[in-house]
Amino acid sequence: MEQIETEIARLKQEKNAVLLAHYYVPDEVQACADFVGDSFYLSRVAQQTSAETIVFCGVSFMGESAKILNPSRTVLMPEPAADCPMAHMADITALEALRAEHPDLAVVCYINSTAELKAHCDVCVTSSNALAIVRALPNREILFLPDENLGRYIASLVPEKTFYFQQGFCPVHKRITPAACAEAKAAHPGAPLFLHPECVPEAVALADFAGSTSEIISAAEKSSAPLILIGTDTGVLFELRRRCPDKRFLPVVSDQCCRDMRTVTLPKVLRCLRDGTGEVTLPEELRTGALRPLERMLELGR
Ligand code: 13P
Ligand code: SF4
């Protein structure tokens, strides 16, 4: 183990801290983490951990969700400025106007969202549980936000409900265009395309499998294909190669990379553990408002 990893391991023990990492953070940070996973898995781990401190290697909505779900823990973000642009792409005034016009409306909020937006919604979802949760809701009308692409993908699988959207999107997955997918498939005939549903629907339509980061990794493990085309942030390649050393994985485009996630580095993990920097705090009223839809997600997504 390198010196920095040894020091992180020592500080984790000293401070009774647990390190959570999303699949999009740099490889060496994933390698150092106690738990690596998709957004749903990490939110459950954050809710259930008995460690005094949670170091969340990811973007701000993830650390915020951990604090909302487990307020008695100290939650530290190694890079507090790491943010998800999509989390801010929602219009709360328009949401409330639609709610006033449609009394049966359920407002379904992707976990990639601010705490303020969550507090205005009925239930949160992630890409791995959105389908089951939307189906389980008694409401026939759904406002899905902020991610229009994920929302349209879910809507295509639940035709019996009426969907409304706003215009949020992930800039990273938007770069994985239908043309790039078609080109990659033509260049590698027979190689299946595994894609994240944050991509535009026309790209998802070309995929052999669509799912969250964890679901893509599990599907790749089960697949018999020797080469798989990957349509999500290239951070997943670390876990894919670890679990499937005999398979090859090719990103659809060269810049499938979330810049904010990449700002979470090992020296920053060390600093926040050592100095207690990057602590997530939330006004209690906002925390309890955002807790309700997150808890509903954990109940319905069990
Ligand atoms: P999942 O890991 O839940 O698939 O989320 C993808 C993502 O874009 C996180 O920001
Ligand atoms: Fe947000 Fe996209 Fe980055 Fe995920 S990959 S944190 S959705 S910008």
Image: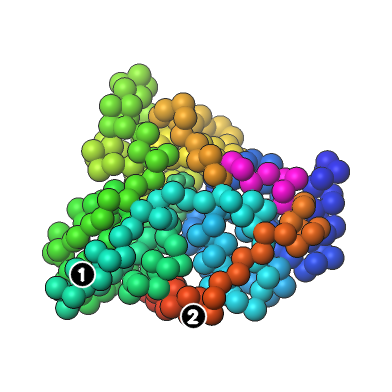
Q: Which residues are magenta?
A: 262-269
The residue lying at 37 percent from left, 60 percent from top is 110
The front one of 10 and 73 is 73
Q: Earlier in the sequence, mark 1 or mark 2?
A: 1
Answer yes or no: disc 2 within 8 Å of ligand 2.
no
Q: Which x, y percent locates residue 154? A: 26, 56
Task: Determine which of the numbered discs, if any, sits on residue 285 in the image.
Answer: 2
Is residue 182 found left or right of 227 in the rendered image? left
Q: Position of residue 208 (x, y in %)?
A: 31, 39
Left or right placement of residue 141 versus residue 111 in this view = left
Question: Which quarter of the picture shows residue 14?
Answer: bottom right
Q: Which residue is mark 1?
A: 97
Q: Position of residue 98 (x, y in %)?
A: 19, 68
Q: Is residue 266 magenta?
A: yes
Question: How far apart in space, not on screen, are marks 1 and 2 (Cα)?
Answer: 23 Å
At horizontal 33% and vertical 42% (from top left) the residue drawn is 199
Q: Is residue 114 left or right of residue 281?
A: left
Quarter occupied by the N terminus = top right
Residue type for callout 2? Glu
The answer, for residue 68, to whether it is visible in the render is yes
User: Residue 155: x percent and y percent?
Assistant: 21, 57
Label 2 element class: helix
**Magenta region, main secondary structure:** helix
Three-letter residue code for mark 1 = Ala
